[in-house]
Image (cartoon, coloured by chain):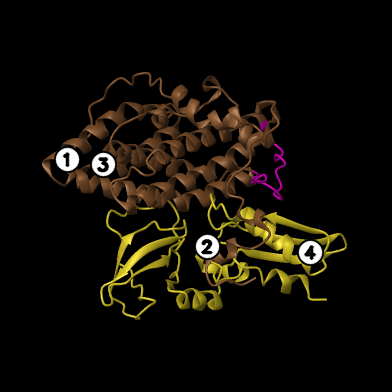
Chain colours: A brown, B yellow
């Protein structure tokens, strides 16, 4: 089983090896998913579901840029980041389902697919930041910067989770998110500190994202406040380097973007639940 | 009969077929028990779509070698690091025109933001020149970055340190 290139491997008889469509096996196959004693299973499931929903919806928004990015390198970068987040979503949704099977819609699908494709908008728990539709590349970079900075700080705390599965997901995710954050931060600086036009659009992107920042933090707790301080420090660094200004506080509007997003994301799975490709 | 470990060690990576899963450090353990063979693997990246292919390849290879009961398990912790790529794996990467990774950084506490890509001395796998530049930290697969050699002007991929 040795090949000179990846394409040669494709021509092999046993083609289940390139199962990149349907038919994924449980991403937690072979992993001990018993809930440790002293951990509230329902609460563990809920937090995994929330984190999984954020990753799933953000990944979808990144995938929308496939074939629309300004340069080939960024096309590849956005697809890679979307894929990393989809991987996090798969594990987190599967973890949520194992901890609390009552969360999973009763359909003949794997747990992760049932949760991703057969829940309605009201049952999703993602932050509004990831739902927001439309926007230009500057808006996307502002959103990715905020999202990955926040999520990286959250994951750095999750490595101390009593649940070994969550610990492992977080440890892996940290390495990925650090790349995502650096990528977004460099673009924000490059556009902010670029031409008058790029500066203007970068500032507008940041302003549009900013009302959705407060929702990410539970500032009533000391850890929430510490998380916010860590986030603010990174934002200040990027905003200063990009000659941008911290956006003014503004009320977050309802997004009404999740339903249309789900209508697209879930359409194939719902119309053809038995489809394989 | 060839040992289960020896069989598992011949299975190649679906995306880097010049390397075995053992070269890559993805193959963590192979144990023969009374109930069959237990193989443990650790994904390189969380979203790695090749995991199912790896699992299938390991099962097929072991079945073909006469092992009927094969259980391929995924272990997420400790997380995979490029430091696990063996010296043989690094040599194969370079030979295939892919620059092998350097040492992965270990940080405790908040990970500092890097607004400019830290300069890395990555030698060109084609001509050997150390004068190379980063084009993109993302490439055709999640585990690689794209670089270009200033000496021979050839672009090449570099396995990112994680």
Q: CA distance from mark 2 to mark 3?
A: 31 Å
Q: Position of residue B153 (x, y in %)?
A: 27, 73
Q: Secondary structure at mark 3?
A: helix
Residue holding disc 3: A236
| Residue A28 part of the magenta segment | yes
Residue holding disc 4: B63
Q: Nearer the viewer, mark 3 or mark 4?
A: 4
- Secondary structure mostly seen in magenta is loop
Instruction: Confirm whether circles 3 and 4 share one chain.
Output: no
Q: Nearer the viewer, mark 2 or mark 3?
A: 2
Q: Nearer the viewer, mark 1 or mark 2?
A: 1
Q: Are marks 1 and 3 in contact (CB under 8 Å)?
A: no
Q: CA distance from mark 4 to mark 2?
A: 29 Å
Residue holding disc 2: B81
Instruction: Confirm whether circles 1 and 2 share one chain.
Output: no
Residue holding disc 1: A199
Label 4 environment density (alpha carbons within 10 Å; few <14, some 14–19, many ≥20): some
A125 versus A189 height, above or below: above
Which quadrant would residue A217 be assigned to in this image?
Answer: top left
Q: Nearer the viewer, mark 1 or mark 3?
A: 1
Q: Which residues are magenta?
A: A23-41
């Amino acid at each position: 089983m040795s090949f000179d290139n990846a394409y040669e491997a494709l021509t092999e008889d046993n083609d289940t090896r390139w199962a990149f469509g349907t038919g994924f096996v449980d991403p937690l196959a072979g992993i001990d998913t018993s809930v440790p004693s002293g951990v509230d299973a329902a609460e563990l499931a809920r937090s995994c579901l929330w984190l999984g929903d954020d990753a799933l919806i953000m990944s979808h928004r990144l995938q929308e840029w496939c074939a629309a990015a300004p340069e080939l390198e960024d096309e590849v970068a956005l697809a890679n980041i979307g894929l990393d987040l989809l991987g996090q979503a798969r594990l987190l949704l599967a973890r949520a389902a194992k901890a609390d099977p009552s969360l999973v819609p009763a359909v003949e699908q794997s747990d992760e697919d049932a949760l991703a494709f057969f829940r309605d908008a009201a049952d999703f728990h993602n932050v509004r930041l990831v739902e927001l539709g439309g926007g230009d590349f500057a808006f996307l970079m502002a959103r990715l910067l905020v999202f990955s900075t926040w999520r990286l700080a959250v994951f750095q705390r999750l490595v101390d989770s009593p649940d070994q599965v969550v610990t492992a997901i977080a440890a892996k995710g940290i390495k990925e998110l650090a790349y995502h954050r650096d990528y977004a931060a460099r673009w924000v600086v490059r556009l902010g500190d670029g031409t008058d036009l790029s500066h203007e659009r970068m500032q507008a992107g940041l302003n549009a994202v900013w009302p959705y920042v407060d929702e990410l933090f539970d500032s009533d707790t000391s850890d929430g406040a510490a998380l916010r301080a860590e986030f603010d420090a990174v934002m200040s660094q990027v905003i200063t380097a990009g000659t941008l200004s911290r956006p003014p506080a503004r009320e977050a509007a309802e997004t009404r973007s999740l339903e249309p997003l789900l209508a697209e994301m879930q359409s194939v799975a719902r119309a053809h639940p038995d489809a394989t490709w | 009969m060839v040992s289960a470990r020896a069989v598992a060690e011949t299975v190649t990576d679906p995306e880097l077929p010049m390397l075995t899963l053992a070269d890559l450090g993805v193959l963590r353990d192979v144990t023969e028990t009374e109930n069959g063979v237990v193989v443990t693997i650790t994904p390189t990246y969380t979203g790695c779509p090749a995991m199912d292919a790896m699992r299938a390849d390991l099962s097929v290879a072991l079945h073909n070698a006469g092992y009927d009961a094969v259980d391929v398990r995924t272990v997420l912790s400790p997380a995979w690091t490029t430091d696990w790529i063996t010296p043989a794996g690094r040599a194969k990467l370079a030979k295939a025109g892919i620059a092998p990774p350097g040492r992965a950084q270990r940080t405790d506490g908040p990970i500092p933001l890097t607004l400019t890509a830290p300069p890395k001395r990555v030698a060109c796998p084609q001509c050997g020149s150390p004068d190379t530049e980063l084009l993109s930290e993302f490439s055709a697969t999640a585990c690689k970055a794209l670089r270009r050699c200033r000496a021979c002007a050839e672009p090449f991929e570099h396995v990112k340190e994680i």
